[in-house]
Amino acid sequence: MRIILLGPPGAGKGTHAGTISALKSVPHVASGDLFRKHQQEETELGILAGSFMSKGELVPDEVTIRMIEQRLGEDDCWQGIILDGFPRTVTQATALDQLFASLDHKLDLVLYLAVSEDELVRRLGGRITCRNCQTPYNLVSSPPKIENVCNQCNGELYQRPDDTADAVRQRIQVFTQQTIPLVDYYTSKGILTEIDGEQDISEVQRALIAAV
Ligand code: ADP
Ligand code: AMP
C-alpha cells in the first residue's frame, strides 16, 4: 500500500505515521526527517537544506525530489510506503506520479489532516522531538513518560529550531501558498480522504485507521 500523509506543519503526520506504518508493514519515509539526518551528518545536502529549513522555507524541488527518488529506490520501499511531508508542491507531486508510473506502482490513498492555524501554532509551540528517532511529543497534549527522554529509544528530546514562533508562521504561510493546491490535485484523482485532525490524538488515530 502506498499512502501520503498530507497536512500543514503540526497537523499530526509524524504522530500517526508510525501506527499506519506498523498496521500496513510498510516503511515511514518523512522528507523532513531525512533532511535532519543529513544535517546531523553534516553532508552537503544537509548544509544546503538547513539554510532553507531554518527560515521555514521549502528546500528546492530538484534536490528534494532527488533525495526521495533515492530513498524510494531502496529495497524496503518496494512493497509499499507511508510518505510524510512529501510531496509539498505540485512539481513534487507530478514527479512522484512519474516515478510510480515508471515502476508500475500505484498511489492508493492520500490522507489529508485538516487543522486550524491557531491550533497548529499552539501545538508547534509545545512540540519536543527526539534527536535520535524523531518521534514528536508535546509538553501539553502528549508528554514523554520521563522528562526530556524519548519513550521509544531513550533519545534526548529537543525543540526544533524551526518550531520558533517566526519560523512556524512562515511554514504555515508556505503550506497555504505551495502545498494546499495538492488537496485539489489528489481530490481530482479521487484518492483523497480528509480527516478532522483537530480532534484528540486517539480520535484522529481511530479515523485514520478506519480510512486505511
Ligand atoms: P507534523 O508531523 O504534521 O508536523 P506532529 O505529529 O509532529 O506534526 O505533531 C505536532 C505537535 O502536535 C506535536 O507536539 C504532537 O505531539 C502534537 N499533536 C499531534 N496531534 C495532536 C492532536 N490531535 N491533539 C493535540 N496535539 C497533537
Ligand atoms: P517537516 O519535518 O516535514 O516539518 O519539514 C521540515 C522542513 O524540511 C520544512 O520546513 C522544509 O524546509 C523541509 N522540507 C521537508 N519536506 C520538504 C519537501 N517535500 N519539500 C521541500 N522542503 C521540505
Image: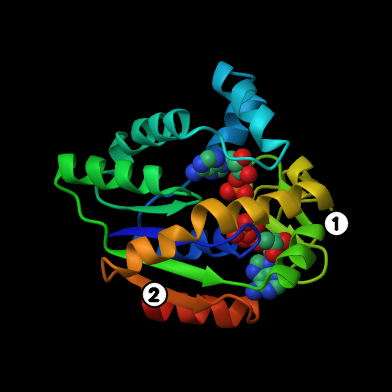
Quick check: 38 left or right of 103? right
Q: Could you give the CA–CA distance between mark 2 and mark 1, rounded to whole angstroms? A: 36 Å
Question: Which SS class for mark 2?
Answer: strand
Sequence-first disc among 2 and 1: 1
The quadrant of the picture occupied by the N terminus is bottom left
Residue 92 drawn at (x, y percent): 39, 43
Exactly how many numbered labels are in the figure? 2
Q: Nearer the viewer, mark 2 or mark 1?
A: 2
The quadrant of the picture occupied by the C terminus is bottom left
Quick check: 196 left or right of 164? left
Q: Is residue 44 above or below residue 126?
A: above
Quick check: 9 left or right of 162? left
- Residue furthest out toward the right: 147
Characterize the local packing of mark 1: few (<14), some (14-19) or many (20 or more) Cα atoms within 10 angstroms: few
Q: What residue sits right under mark 2 in the picture?
A: 193
Amino acid carrying label 1: it is: Glu
Would residue 89 be seen by someone viewing this image from the given angle? yes
**The one of 109 and 62 positioned closer to us in this rendering:** 62
Residue 63 drawn at (x, y percent): 46, 28
Locate residue 133: give its quadrant: top right
Would residue 32 be seen by someone viewing this image from the given angle? no
Q: Residue at x 66, y 73 (%)?
A: 116
**The one of 144 and 125 positioned closer to us in this rendering:** 125
Q: What residue sits right under mark 1 in the picture?
A: 147
Amino acid carrying label 2: it is: Thr
The answer to whether mark 2 and mark 1 are in CB contact below 8 A is no
